[in-house]
Amino acid sequence: ADAQLELFYRRLGSIFSHNQRDSGAIAYLAHSLLFGAPESRGLRSFRCRLANHYGSTITSWRRNFAAGGRQLSFGRFRDVCREMKCRKEAPELWSQLDPGMSGCLSLFELDPDAVALLGHVRSRIMMVVNTDEADSEELFRRLTSHLIPAKPGQLDIAEFRQVLRNFGFGIEIADRAFTCLDYEGGNCKPP
């Protein structure tokens, strides 16, 4: 079995080697995902509650945690848990989100799937747009040059789908990304 795992890690590393990624880091990530403890039901439930309450975990982060910077302290996390009526679970949830006991959380630890999705969308857009230095207004203008948004400076879901379709994304990915980025939270109840 060890030989098969080593072969798997080498092949996985070779897949990402053309992107100048550290194959050792890729192998470590794969190993931790394969052999790490699965997420608890309570943590999955908490993420669902955040998403249902705010529209997405990303929106909950932007509304509750982003003001404190890129890291979240336990005190602020506990306050949000209290607002969501799950304060008693805060220590257990925190320990699951921060197993290394660093004392702070990032958005990636709160919802790695959403961060990976948005990172993938961003990297594809930046590859096609061919710049890392455009400001947000210039980037928006370039992305929407082929359509006229119904609201200036904003895209609705149909417009967002059209923009992402031009970058090779399907409707499902576009809808998931839109939900993550929608600060208003769509049809969800207000916080």
Image: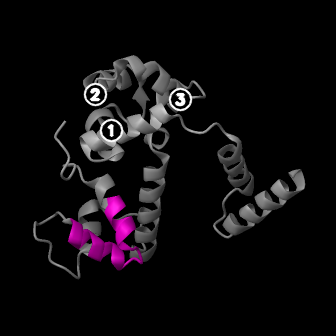
Mark 1, Cα crowd under 10 Å, few <14 / some 14-19 / many 20+, is: many
Q: What's the residue type where badge 1 is placed?
A: Leu
Label count reads: 3
Q: Residue, x 34% and y 73% (percent of image)?
A: 164
Instruction: Say whether residue 184 is left or right of residue 12.
Output: left
User: Can you tell which mark lies on residue 60?
Assistant: none
Q: Secondary structure at mark 3?
A: helix
Residue sitting nearer the eye, 95 or 187: 187
Q: Of marks 2 and 1, which one's residue comes earlier in the chain?
A: 1
For label 2, the SS is loop
2, above or below 13, in the image: above
Residue 154's spot in the image, x, y percent?
17, 63
- Magenta-drawn segment: 157-177
Question: Measured from the top left, where is residue 175 in percent x and y?
Answer: 32, 64
Depicted 160 relative to depicted 40: above or below? below
| Residue for badge 3 | 96
Q: Which residue is mark 2?
A: 84
| Mark-to-mark CA distance, 2 and 1 | 8 Å
N-terminal of the pair, mark 2 or mark 3, is 2
Badge 3: residue crowd in 10 Å (few <14, some 14–19, many ≥20): some
Q: Residue at x 17, y 42 (%)?
A: 189
- Identify the residue position indicated by label 1 in the image: 50
Image coordinates of residue 58 in percent, x first then y, are: 34, 46
The image quadrant where one finds the C terminus is top left
Q: Quadrant of residue 176?
A: bottom left
| Residue at 73%, 61% in the rendered image | 13
Q: Is residue 26 left or right of residue 55?
A: right
Label whose residue precedes the other's in the sequence (3 or 1): 1
